């Protein structure tokens, strides 16, 4: 399978939202295109926060976001935060997620990151096995809160 990973552009948003609408992701509860475009525009204002897509034969079959964050700790070494990782259901298990994560980690290495981190919902045990198979280790705890 020929896979190409590239930075997403605004015209990719409808395909990205279709991926997030899958039952194992946001189960159909996704942004409308105008809202997604506004978020995409804001993300592009950040110096190192981008969305990426994986294509197979011209079809978008996976996506992820990567933020490279500057730090004052760790002697100023940046860190990478990988978010919103998803592969089209029919393409899962074909190495696309692995290629996307290697791509993200390559960027983190190029940028001199001291670590790359991601979080995964506790109920996504298949995803946990996938990340552990790539060498990610469980580290500490991830805490969330809904402000308000």
Image (spheres, helix red, strand yellow):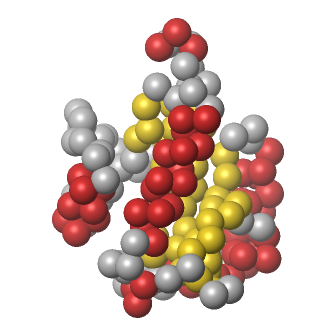
Q: Residue 132 at x, y = what percent?
A: 24, 52
Identify which residue, 2 or 54, lies in the foreground.
Answer: 2
Say if 79 sits above or below 56 in the image: above
Visible residue check, residue 98? yes
Query: Would you identify the image quadrant in which residue 9 lies?
Result: bottom right
Q: In this view, does 105 lie to the left or right of 125?
A: right
Q: Is residue 107 left or right of residue 43?
A: left
Say if 127 sits above or below 30 in the image: above
Query: Would you identify the image quadrant in which residue 46 lies?
Result: top right
Identify which residue, 33 or 60, lies in the foreground.
Answer: 60
Visible residue check, residue 17? no
Residue at 41% over, 63% down: 98
Q: Residue 72 at x, y = what percent?
A: 56, 13
Identify which residue, 123 or 75, lies in the foreground.
Answer: 75
Q: Residue 54 at x, y = what percent?
A: 58, 72
Q: In this view, does 112 lie to the left or right of 34?
A: left
Say if 6 sits above or below 66 in the image: below
Residue at 52% over, 9% down: 75
- Extreme-top residue of the structure: 75
Residue at 77% over, 51% down: 44
Residue at 79% over, 77% down: 11
């Amino acid at each position: 399978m020929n896979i190409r990973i590239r930075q997403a552009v605004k015209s990719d948003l409808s395909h990205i939202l279709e991926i997030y609408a899958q039952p194992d992701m946001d189960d159909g509860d996704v942004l409308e295109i105008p809202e997604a475009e506004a978020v995409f525009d804001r993300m592009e204002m950040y110096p190192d926060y981008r969305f990426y897509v994986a294509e197979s034969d011209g079809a978008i079959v996976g996506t992820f976001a990567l933020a490279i964050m500057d730090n004052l700790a760790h002697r100023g070494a940046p860190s990478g935060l990988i978010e919103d990782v998803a592969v089209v259901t029919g393409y899962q298990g074909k190495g696309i997620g692995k290629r996307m994560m290697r791509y993200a980690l390559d960027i983190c290495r190029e940028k001199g990151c001291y670590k790359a981190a991601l979080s995964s919902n506790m109920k996504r045990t298949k995803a946990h096995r996938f990340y552990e198979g790539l060498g990610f280790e469980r580290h500490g705890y991830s805490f969330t809160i809904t402000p308000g």
